[in-house]
Every structure is written in structure tokens, then in C-alpha cells.
């Protein structure tokens, strides 16, 4: 009876979330509305004698009216440059071009299959969660390949397929902000963070690897936590599988795929050797010319270029070895396909870029940041409670807006300057946001692949619905929250940089 009541409350809560979320306009429309709202808000606020004093420069900041003649001219004349100079646009397009070749050649799929097939039975769950986390580098490949594959593998091993599906989903989506590698989301978020940081400091730069140290360590904690939840909570609750789906045979890698991976290994060794040759020597060609610094080197400042080259080189190596890429046209087709899928993203970016630019021009972001920082100082809350509260806010907003970049484009212009005025770096704020953004991905109906996961679950349980999936994934959400917050607090107390050159305090 208690379980039925619990499921009833969960279903009721999810119905509310789903209904509210479904009533929201498309993210592109939202940004268009935000941009228009900022223009009218700037006019309303300018009617009052409202001002704040910049705590860094002592300058008096007043709102700028974009409905004035000068404001309208500025909007018209800068519409194109707002779009073309929007930091995340180019970085995402370039990074994805390289990864698209690796995905189109079959490299990423082959690596995922190899990882799962070669894992010992006792480590099967860990390997699946771990592979899910690593698959984030290639965006949707984890959802469309690893999640259904993991259910098949669990069933073949005599275990409940939904438990395998849940483990993979927890890694792919719940572990979205943990990885050993950088993916397309890293330069995207870094670009948005940098744009927001410019509200306070026009010269501030945020590297795509800004959260890499924290992400790297988080990978092992989240993989271990996901394994524990699967084996101690989810699988016992599901019991023995009694459905009608029979186990399928998972085909091992054929000779051409193995040859492709061998070629890839050679390419990785060569690519790594070139990078090390440019970084390790004091006069390495990838170090900063004048100072010899690694932190300000072309390698770290141009990490997007290396993501592109890494994906391109390994993808070509695998494709040539496996025979999936026979000529230059095949590689170009992979790039073209990835660009086709980015059509909606480019449209969204156009309106997001206008919103961010308008928000900066009006000084509303700076005014809100100063007033917000003063409020937080007066609240008496210490830095740890403030950051935990921010993680929770991010997690709650994630239930209603699925896209990580869409949320951060709205939140960054407010929270990044606010925390900067309190003395915290944009990189630290971004790391806190990413924790909150990840932990509720697996229970958010607004997550773009949520419906697909429900369909996968329905294959093994015809009666399963949203409530079934949420009830299965909630233990991961709570556990990931606890583990990640504890890790974040320890990280903060020890004062460890969250990434290369990314300190805790300004």
C-alpha cells in the first residue's frame, strides 16, 4: 500500500511538471520573448531614477533604454554581429565537425561495444555506467546506442534488462557533467560563461577546459555511485525479469572493426606524442611564446581545435582501417550530417545571442548582480551554503528546461556576475551549475531524450510509463546529489582549481 501511495504521489508530481513543461513555448521562442522583454523592461526601469555603484570601479551604473532612438539603432546595426560573434556558436560547430567524423566512421559505437563486451561480469554494471559517462563526448550516441545495448547485455547475462538500461541512462544523462574527455558541451558552456563574465570584466577569458579537473575526478565517484544504486537499490526492487523479450546475441567486433581500432590506436599515439612534444619541453611549440606558460598556451586556449583534430584524426584512422571511410567524400558526409542536425541549434543561437547582447547593453545584468550580491552579503550565508543553494536552484530549473545551454544562457548573465562580485570565479560558478544540471536530467520529462528512454523501457514492460521511469531513476538523483555536493564541498575547502588556471577566487 505504501509503495502504491508513493507511486501515486510521484505520478501526480510528474504530471504537474509535464503539464507545466508542455505549456512552455519552444526554447527558440522563449529566447525571442526574453529579448523583447528585456527591451521593454529597459524602458520601464529607465523611467525611474535607479542606479547602483560598481563595487570594483566606483562607477555609477544606470539602466540603458533600448526603446530610445539610439537604442533602436543599436539593435538594428548590431543584429548580425550579435549572432556571428556569439562565443558558443563557432566553438560548438568546430568541435562537432571533428566528433562527427569519429561517429560517422563507427569508431564511437565500436569503442562502446568493446568496453561493455570485454568487461568481467562483476564489473559489468560499473563499466556500463562508466561508458555512459564517457559517451557524453559524442552527445546523443549514448542515448541511442548504449542505453538499449545495456538492456540487451543485462538480459543476456540473466539480469533484469531495465536495470541495465537504468545504469546506462544514469551514466549518460545523470553523469552529464563528469568525463575524462572534453566534448562539445564544454566549449559551449564556457562561451556562455565568458559572455556573462564580461558584464563585470570585459577582459575575462573562460577556457573550454575550465572544469576539467573537477569533471575528471567526478567521473569515478559518479560511476561508483551509479553502480552501487543499480546493484543495491534498483535491481533488487525490480526483481527477476519475467517479460516476454528473449535475450539477443551481442555480436563481437568483426575483423574490419578490430583493424579499425588498431589504426585508431596508432593515430592516438601519434597525436598524443605531437601534443606532448609541444607541451613538455620548456620551449615547446605549443607553449605561450613570450612566457613559456602552459596555462596561457595555444593548447589550452585553443582546446576546441584539438577536440576537432582529435575527432577527425581518430575517425579517419578508424574509417580507413575498418573500410567505413573509403574516400574524402565519406568523411565530408559525416560532417554534413552533423551540420544538418544543428539547424535548430543555430536558429536558437540567433535569438539567444540577441537576448544576451540586449541584456548586457541595458546594464540590467550588472544592476541585478550588484543588488543580488548585496542581498547575499546581508543574508549572512557562507560560501558553501550559497553554492549548495545555487546547485539546488539549477537542479529545479532543469526539471522545466531540458537544454543545458538554454538554461545557462538565461542563468549565467545573472549568477556569474553576482558570484563574481562576491569574489568567486566564473569557472567555479559554472562547475556548480553543471552539478545541478546533471542530477535531475534523469527525472526530467523536459530532457530531449526522455521520451526515447520511456520507449526503451516499454519494450521490456508494456505497462511502464513516466512514473515507472522516474521511480527507477530517483535513487540515482538523490545519490548523485549527495555524492556530488560532498565532493564539491571538499573541493572548495581544499581550494583545488576546478580546471587549468581556474581558481576558486578572483
Image: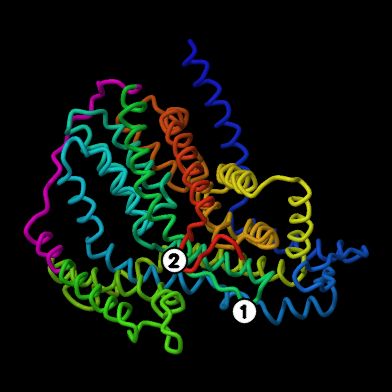
Which of marks 1 and 2 precedes in the sequence?
1
Q: Is 474 situated left or right of 360 in this image?
A: left
**Residue found 49% across the figure and 46% down from its top:** 447
Find out whether the residues at labels 2 and 1 contact each other: C-beta distance under 8 Å.
no
In-front residue for pair 166/378:
378
**Residue found 69% across the figure and 69% down from its top:** 200
In space, the residues marked 2 and 1 are separated at their CA atoms by 28 Å
**Residue found 53% across the figure and 20% down from its top:** 8
Q: Provide residue 217's location: percent of width, then percent of height.
A: 38, 52
SS at badge 1: helix
Any magenta on residue 486? no
Residue 248 falls in which quadrant of the image?
A: top left
Residue 167 falls in which quadrant of the image?
A: top left
Magenta part of the protein: which range? 237-263
Placement of 278 over or under 118, stated as above or below: below
Residue that protrudes farthest toward the left in the picture: 255
Residue ID for mark 2: 209
SS at badge 2: loop
Amino acid at each position: 500500500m505504501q509503495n502504491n501511495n508513493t507511486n501515486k504521489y510521484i505520478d501526480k508530481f510528474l504530471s504537474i511538471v509535464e503539464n507545466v513543461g508542455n505549456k512552455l513555448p519552444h526554447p527558440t521562442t522563449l529566447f525571442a520573448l526574453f529579448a523583447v522583454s528585456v527591451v521593454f523592461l529597459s524602458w520601464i526601469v529607465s523611467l525611474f531614477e535607479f542606479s547602483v555603484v560598481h563595487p570594483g570601479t566606483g562607477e555609477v551604473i544606470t539602466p540603458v533604454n533600448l526603446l530610445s532612438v539610439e537604442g533602436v539603432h543599436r539593435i538594428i546595426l548590431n543584429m548580425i554581429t550579435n549572432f556571428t560573434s556569439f562565443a558558443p556558436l563557432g566553438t560548438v560547430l568546430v568541435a562537432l565537425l571533428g566528433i562527427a567524423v569519429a561517429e560517422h566512421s563507427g569508431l564511437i559505437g565500436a569503442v562502446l561495444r568493446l568496453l561493455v563486451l570485454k568487461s568481467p561480469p562483476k564489473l559489468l554494471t560499473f563499466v556500463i555506467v562508466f561508458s555512459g559517462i564517457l559517451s557524453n563526448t559524442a552527445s546523443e550516441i549514448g542515448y541511442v546506442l548504449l542505453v538499449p545495448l545495456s538492456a540487451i547485455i543485462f538480459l543476456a547475462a540473466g539480469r533484469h534488462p531495465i536495470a541495465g538500461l537504468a545504469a546506462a541512462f544514469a551514466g549518460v544523462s545523470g553523469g552529464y557533467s563528469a568525463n575524462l574527455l572534453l566534448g562539445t558541451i564544454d566549449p559551449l558552456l564556457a562561451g556562455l560563461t565568458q559572455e556573462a563574465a564580461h558584464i563585470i570584466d570585459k577582459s575575462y577569458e573562460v577556457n573550454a577546459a575550465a572544469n576539467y579537473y573537477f569533471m575528471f575526478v567526478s567521473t569515478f565517484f559518479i560511476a561508483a555511485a551509479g553502480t552501487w544504486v543499480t546493484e543495491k537499490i534498483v535491481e533488487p526492487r525490480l526483481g527477476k525479469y519475467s517479460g516476454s523479450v528473449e535475450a539477443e546475441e551481442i555480436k563481437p567486433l568483426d575483423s574490419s572493426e578490430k583493424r579499425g581500432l588498431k589504426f585508431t590506436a596508432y593515430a592516438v599515439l601519434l597525436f598524443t606524442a605531437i601534443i606532448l612534444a609541444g607541451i613538455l619541453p620548456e620551449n615547446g611549440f605549443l607553449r605561450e611564446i613570450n612566457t613559456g606558460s602552459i596555462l596561457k598556451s595555444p593548447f589550452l586556449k585553443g582546446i576546441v581545435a584539438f577536440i576537432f583534430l582529435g575527432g577527425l584524426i581518430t575517425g579517419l584512422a578508424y574509417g580507413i582501417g575498418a573500410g567505413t571511410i573509403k574516400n574524402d567524400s565519406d568523411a565530408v558526409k559525416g560532417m554534413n550530417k552533423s551540420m544538418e542536425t544543428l539547424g535548430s541549434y543555430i536558429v536558437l543561437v540567433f535569438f539567444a545571442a540577441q537576448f544576451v547582447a540586449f541584456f548586457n547593453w541595458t546594464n540590467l545584468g550588472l544592476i541585478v548582480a550588484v543588488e543580488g550580491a548585496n542581498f547575499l552579503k546581508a543574508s549572512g550565508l557562507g560560501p558553501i551554503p550559497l553554492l549548495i543553494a545555487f546547485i539546488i536552484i539549477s537542479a529545479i530549473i532543469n526539471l522545466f528546461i531540458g537544454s543545458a545551454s538554454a538554461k545557462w544562457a538565461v542563468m549565467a548573465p545573472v549568477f556569474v556576475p553576482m558570484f563574481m562580485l562576491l569574489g568567486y570565479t566564473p569557472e567555479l560558478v559554472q562547475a556548480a551549475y553543471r552539478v545541478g544540471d546533471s542530477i535531475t536530467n534523469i527525472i526530467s520529462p523536459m530532457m530531449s531524450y526522455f521520451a526515447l528512454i520511456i520507449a526503451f523501457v516499454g519494450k521490456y514492460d508494456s505497462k511502464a510509463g513516466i512514473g515507472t521511469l522516474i521511480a527507477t531513476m530517483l535513487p540515482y538523483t538523490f545519490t548523485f546529489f549527495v555524492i556530488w555536493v560532498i565532493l564539491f564541498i571538499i573541493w572548495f575547502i581544499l581550494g583545488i582549481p576546478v580546471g587549468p588556471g581556474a581558481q576558486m577566487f578572483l
